[in-house]
Amino acid sequence: MLKMRILIDAGVPKDSLMAASFYKKLVKRGHETFVTARKYESTAVLLEYFDVPYKEIGQYGGKTLKGKLLADLKRAIELTNYISELDKIDLVIHFANPAAARVAFGLGIPQIVLEDTPHATIVHRLTFSLATYGITPKCFPRDLLVHIIDPDRLIQYDGVDPIEWITTFSPDKRFLRMLGLNESEPIVILRPAETYAYYYLQYSSGSPLLFEEKLIKSILSAFPDTQIVVFPRYEDQKKILRDKFGERLKIPHKYIPAFNIIAYSTVVITGGGTIVEEGGLYGVPSIYFFPKKLSYAEYLKNKGLPVFHLTKPEEIIDTTLLILRDPDKYRVDATPIIKKFERPSDKIFELLEVLRTG
């Protein structure tokens, strides 16, 4: 079997979860695998947690469009130099990262792009247009991409991205102890919205938080013993919540892979998709308040997993309190459901065979 030299590029924390799983599987099969990571939130820390060697290249461009553009252009140059130093790379795998897409294309290296976010249309145009192959979940509408990439090169799998790491890595209870969490008391997971992301600015107007403070007050008023774990996306989110609620919240000082806590939680509330997917896959009642329905979250809901899409603050607060009153009524045994799902890596290995023979 021909072995390959493969580079995986991670731009955000979720990418690192995927990259870690891919790395372990690729190395096990004898492929020489390199990982690059952008300096953004916990992207690099996650790779360290999973003992994945990596090279940190580039950083987050901040809140402005100019800042994002300049950071991406600089990162593209640094990626170009790094890949050139590695000599021969046979394949680049990335998660719809414009810099990685441009560099792989410019250096004539085949690339596989993975994506599960239908609303990131600008990113799609910058990445799938240059891709050798694209991989998305089946719940991702194909018609969003078939005008950008040859439909024969768009591969879909029956599952969602987090099934990759949920089935590769087991949750570790030591993180409960690290945060001082008691399994016998309710645990609420709160992940604020990615309010500074390009696709979210039209909804947040650049405000760091939406209604999260009101939600926290309502939970603590109705259920004072509830343990609320917050995973802020930005430092100003963390500062606002810590200044207002102090020790009433559990805000990790060091990064903790959220799935380690989600697996033992009572309810998940998040502005984005990844944590709601993780919660659903563990059978935990999970609410997401992104302004639009997310195809992958609705996919899980239609499979019988406890996922809720709510956008009005009062609805979110009321539903959260209902779940906390009777958690067992809402929790689901997800094991028989997720056993039927495909993983993204299944398609990666199918494509490796095509690329090696083709």
Image: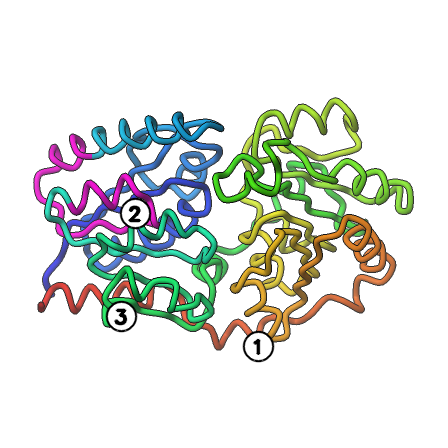
Give the residue number, with chain letter if any, for mark 1: 336
Residue type marked 3: Pro
Residue type marked 1: Pro
Q: Position of residue 202 (x, y in %)?
A: 56, 41
Q: Which of marks 2 and 1 is nearer the N terminus?
A: 2
Q: Earlier in the sequence, mark 3 or mark 1?
A: 3
Residue at horizontal 75 percent and vertical 34 percent from the top:
249
Q: What element carries label 1?
A: helix
Q: Earlier in the sequence, mark 2 or mark 3?
A: 2
Quarter placement of the N terminus? bottom left
CB atoms of marks 3 and 1 within 8 Å: no
Q: In which quarter of the image is residue 356?
A: bottom left
Tag of residue 151: 3
Q: Position of residue 69 (x, y in %)?
A: 34, 31
Q: How crowded is mark 2: few (under 14 residues within 10 Å), some or many (20 or more)?
A: some
Residue at horizontal 11 percent and vertical 43 percent from the top:
107
In the image, the segment drawn in magenta is 80-105
Q: In which quarter of the image is residue 134?
A: bottom left
